[in-house]
Image (spheres, rainbow, N blue to C red):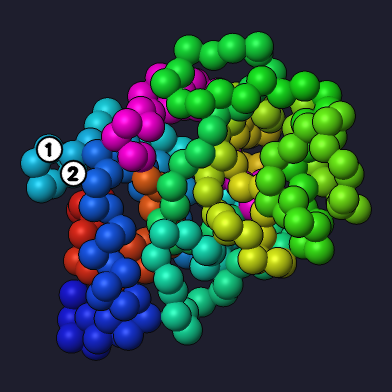
Amino acid sequence: MNILLKALSVALFPLAAMAQGLDGSDQLIVVTSKSWDDIQGTAQRYERHGQTFRKFEAPFAVVLGKNGMGWGKGLLDIEQPEGPVKQEGDGKAPAGMFKLGTAFGYAPSADTRLPYLALTPTIECVDDSQSTRYNELVDGAVVDKGWNSSERMRRSDELYRQGIVIQHNTPATPAAGSCIFFHIWRGPSAPTRGCTAMDPANIAQLFDWLDPGKSPVLVQLPEAQYEQLREHWKLPKR
């Protein structure tokens, strides 16, 4: 990293925040794309060995938002970032570093160590920025409906047959983006509305591999930003 890029990364990402990024995490998923606007990317899994992360098995293809990526709200506080910033409804997948939350799916149970939510027809993800339930998965049959817009999670297609919550904008800031998941893709060239999607076999691999006891983390960035920040975020070589 040259001096200019190093100075820029220090200015944008305070050192105090950097230190806590991957500390305590033993599993890492890195998703990179060629540019901010690219709708396709590559995912690589890593496992910690001592002080370093080593690649785990082969990389796989993913698709991103229909408008690429924008800086999201995750583990590290990004101040005055260069590049787009994610907003509600912008069709961008979030860039940054994020924890992973519950797994979900159409089956009543799943073979995974992640907490699992079986999706019923009444479960919704609230995308109404004015609601106190914004960016939450809720059961509309048991919760007072205080929102005007939401996404039904039990779909008529296969996209959410298996998925995992990406903890972007948690706790929620109004209009910063909501309902971001790993889920099954429509195909290798069909973008999402802001999620990161993949082949069903790769979602199944994540269900099997991810262990909440190892504090898994997702890092999702365009390639240039990944290289710019790799040293300060203590990220492995791609």
Q: Which residue is mark 2?
A: 53
Q: Is residue 230 magenta?
A: no
Label 1–label 2 contact, CB within 8 A: yes
The residue shown at (12%, 38%) is: 49
> In the shown orientation, is residue 217 left or right of residue 64?
left
> In the shown orientation, is residue 184 left or right of residue 223?
right
Q: Position of residue 45 (x, y in %)?
A: 32, 37
209 relative to 170, above or below: above
Please state which of residues 147 and 5 is positioned toward the viewer in this rendering.
Answer: 147
Please state which of residues 128 and 182 is positioned toward the viewer in this rendering.
Answer: 128
Using the rendered image of the protein, determine whether residue 106 is visible from the camera's viewpoint. yes
The residue shown at (66%, 42%) is: 190
Q: Secondary structure at mark 1?
A: strand
The residue shown at (70%, 66%) is: 174
Using the rendered image of the protein, determine whether residue 229 is visible from the camera's viewpoint. no
Q: Which segment is the magenta one? A: 192-216
> In the shown orientation, is residue 39 left or right of residue 81?
right
Q: How many angstroms separate mark 1 from mark 2 (CA)? A: 6 Å
Tag shown at residue 49: 1
Residue 46 position by quadrant: top left
Q: Is residue 197 magenta?
A: yes
Residue 112 position by quadrant: top left
Q: Position of residue 55 (x, y in %)?
A: 22, 37
Q: Label 1: few (<14), some or many (≥20) within 10 Å? A: few
